[in-house]
Image (cartoon, helix red, strand yellow):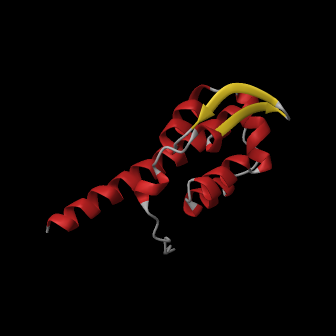
Amino acid sequence: MSQVLKKVDASKVLRTVPFENGFQFCTNVGIYTSVAATSLTDFAAKLDFVDVVSVEFHYPRGDFQLWITKTLGDEELGNRLCLIKSGLHWEQLREELLRLVNERISELNDSIEDEKMSALS
């Protein structure tokens, strides 16, 4: 199956956003964990250690997907996160989220390197 990936500005997706636009991890409605992510790389790092209750709260609501799509501008990753199979234990879900986010970070970094190499040619 062939996929056509929408071209994104990799450096824009990987940028650091102001704190007020960062992802604020909560454990329940209105209960902030004091953990916030201001970039995709920061999001992966924080997702790795934030209380799994926060993953349980945010993922089903589409909060991760919305922030990645609307704030960072990466519709591709937002869509990939929506396709995670249902029924995973919360810790397994965290691992799958991390795998997909880290995979996307690598793709975006590779894209930046490819653009740099093309500019030099």
Residue at the limit of the structure toward the right, as seen here:
29
Q: In the image, residue 50 lies at what x, y percent?
A: 64, 27
Q: Nearer the viewer, residue 58 or 116?
A: 116
Farthest residue to the left: give it. 121
- Residue 36 in the image: state x and y as whole percent: 62, 32
The answer to which of 82 and 91 lies nearer the viewer is 82
Find residue 17 and report its image quarter: top right
Regarding residue 111, the answer to whether it shows in the image is yes
What residue do we see at 46% from left, 56% from top?
12
Task: Point out the image quarter for the C terminus.
Answer: bottom left
Instruction: Say which residue appears at 75% left-offset and 32% top-offset.
Output: 26
Residue that appears at 86% across and 35% down: 29
71 vs 87: above or below: below
**Residue 61 position in % (x across, y down):** 80, 48
Q: Which image quadrant for residue 112? A: bottom left
- Seen at 73% across and 47% down, the residue is 63
Q: Is residue 36 left or right of residue 29?
A: left
- Using the rendered image of the protein, determine whether residue 84 is visible from the camera's viewpoint: no
- As drawn, is 110 to the left or to the right of 96? left
Image coordinates for residue 56, horizontal then vertical, percent: 77, 36
* Numbered-mark total: 0
